[in-house]
Amino acid sequence: MAAASTGVAERRTIDRIPESERHGSPLNQFTLWFGANLQITAVVDGALSIVFGAEALTAIIGLAIGNLLGGAVMALHSAQGPRLGLPQMISSRAQFGVKGAALPLILTVLMYLGFAATGTVLSGQAINLMFGVQAPAFGMLIFGLATILVAIVGYNLIHVIGRIATIVGILGFAYLTWQLVSQYNVSEAFGQKPFTLATFLLTVALAAGWQMTFAPYVADYSRYLPTETPASTTFWSTLLGSTIGAQIAMSFGVVVAALGGKFLQNQVGFMGELAGLGLAAMLTYVVIVTNKLTVNCLNAYGGSMTMLTTVSAFTRQERVSQAVRIAYIIAFVAASVAIAIFASANFLSAFKNFVLLLLAVFVPWSAINLVDYYLISKEKVDIPALYDSAGRYGAYNWTALGCYLFGVVVQIPFLNQALYEGPIAVMLGGADISWIVALVATSVVYYFLARGNANVPQTMILPKDASVRA
C-alpha cells in the first residue's frame, strides 16, 4: 500500500486516513516517543530543576511525577488517533468551531517554532563540532535540510527515525552514564540543598509542561493505526515511551548539573568531553543529532499541518496538494532556522522561560479537548462537519473559546515566571501550580457549560467514502 512506503512523500495531510491506508502497531508509538524524548533538550530541562534550586533526589522524584501526570494527558490525546484518523488540531474544531480553532492553532505554531529553533541550536553545535566548523549557521542549515527531507517523506520515515533514535539513544546514554560514574563521584550530587515545596512543585511543572506540549500533535502520529486498535494500547504505548525516555534524559541532566562543571554553559561541548576524545566524542554528537532530528521532524511535520489546518478553515479545503504541503514544511523549517541563528547566543535563558510559558497556553486547550471528546461527545464525532463552518460545529464555539481564555487568565495569580510572579505564587514561596489550577478549573467549567449545549451526533459520522465501525 502506498502509505506504508518510507521512500515516497506522504500524500495525506489534513484529511482523514482511510481504512485502506491504515497500518502499523502501537509499538511504533513507544519507539517514536521514547526516541523523541531521550535527547539533549530533555537533559537541559532536567538540569533546569537544579538551576531553580531543587535538591537532586527531590528533582528526580518531582520530574518523575510531572512526566507521569503530563504524559497521561498527552497519551489520552494519542488514543484519539486510531478512532478519528485525523491530525490532532483538525479534531479540535469539534470543540472550538471550524474557524474558532485558529486561536489555539496559531499559538501551537509558535510553540513548534520555539522548540524547533532550540533543537536546531543544539544540533547545529553538534554538527559544527563533528566537522570542525566555527560558523554557527553551518550546522543549523545542515540540520534544517535534514529536517526538511524527513518531514517531506512524512509519517512512515519519521517512525523509522524514531526506532533508530531509540536504539542510538539507549546506547549513547548508557555509555555517557558509565563515563559520568567513572569520572565523577555521583553521590556528591545529592543532599546539597534542603527540600522545599516550592522547588519540588516547580520540578513537577517542568516535566508536566514538557509532556503536555506534545499534546497538540501527538495524534498526528497515531492516526494511521488501524481503527480497531484498542485505545488503551495506544495510550500505554505512548505514555511509557514518552515518560521513560524523558525521565532518563532529565535525570541525567539533574545529576550533571548538580555536579557542577560546564554543562549549563556549553551543553553539547560538555557531552562530547564527557564521552572522551576522538571517535567517542564524534559518536556522541551523532547521538545528539539523531535524537534531535526525531523530535525536530515532529515539530516540522506537525507545524506544517497546523498551518494548513488554520488556512483551510477559511478556504474550506478538506485536502491540499503534495506541493502545497511541501511548501509549508520548507517555510516552517526556514523560519525555525532563522530564529535559531538569531537567538542562539541566549539559548538557556530563553528556553527556561519558554517551557514554563507554554504551560499557561496549552493546558486549557488540552482540558477542553479531552473533556469534550471523552465525557461529552463520548468519542462520537461528525467528521465531515469538521471541514464545514456552516455545519454541526459552526464557525466559532464561543463557549469553548470563553473557557479557553478563562483557563489562561485563571492561572495569572499562580504563575511564577521570569517576567511575572503572581500574588498567590508569592504566598506559596514561589511554587508554580498554575498548570494544575488551569487543568482542573477549565475542565470543570467547560463540562458544566458545554454538556447541555453540545451538538453531539448519535454515532460517529464518517466521510461518504469511508468504511469503518462506528
Image: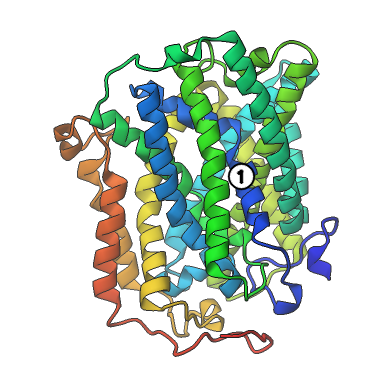
Taking the spot 43% from the left edge, 15% from the top edge, the residue there is: 189
Taking the spot 50% from the left edge, 23% from the top edge, the residue there is: 346
- Which scheme is used to colour this image of the protein? rainbow
Frontmost residue, 69 versus 346? 69
Q: Quadrant of the C terminus?
A: bottom right
Query: Within the image, what quadrant is residue 448 found in?
Result: bottom left
Residue 339 visible: no
Residue 7: percent from left, percent from top: 85, 55
Frontmost residue, 432 versus 283? 283
Taking the spot 36% from the left edge, 77% from the top edge, the residue there is: 376
Say which element carries label 1. helix
Query: Type of residue at label 1?
Result: Phe
Residue 197: percent from left, percent from top: 24, 31
Q: Is residue 285 left or right of residue 367?
A: right
Q: Quadrant of the N terminus?
A: bottom right
Q: Is residue 381 left or right of residue 425?
A: right
Residue 112: percent from left, percent from top: 55, 47
Taking the spot 43% from the left edge, 26% from the top edge, the residue there is: 48
Residue 207 visible: yes
Query: Within the image, what quadrant is residue 328 found in?
Result: bottom right
Q: Is residue 117 left or right of residue 446?
A: right
Q: Is residue 262 left or right of residue 287?
A: left
Q: Which residue is mark 1?
A: 34
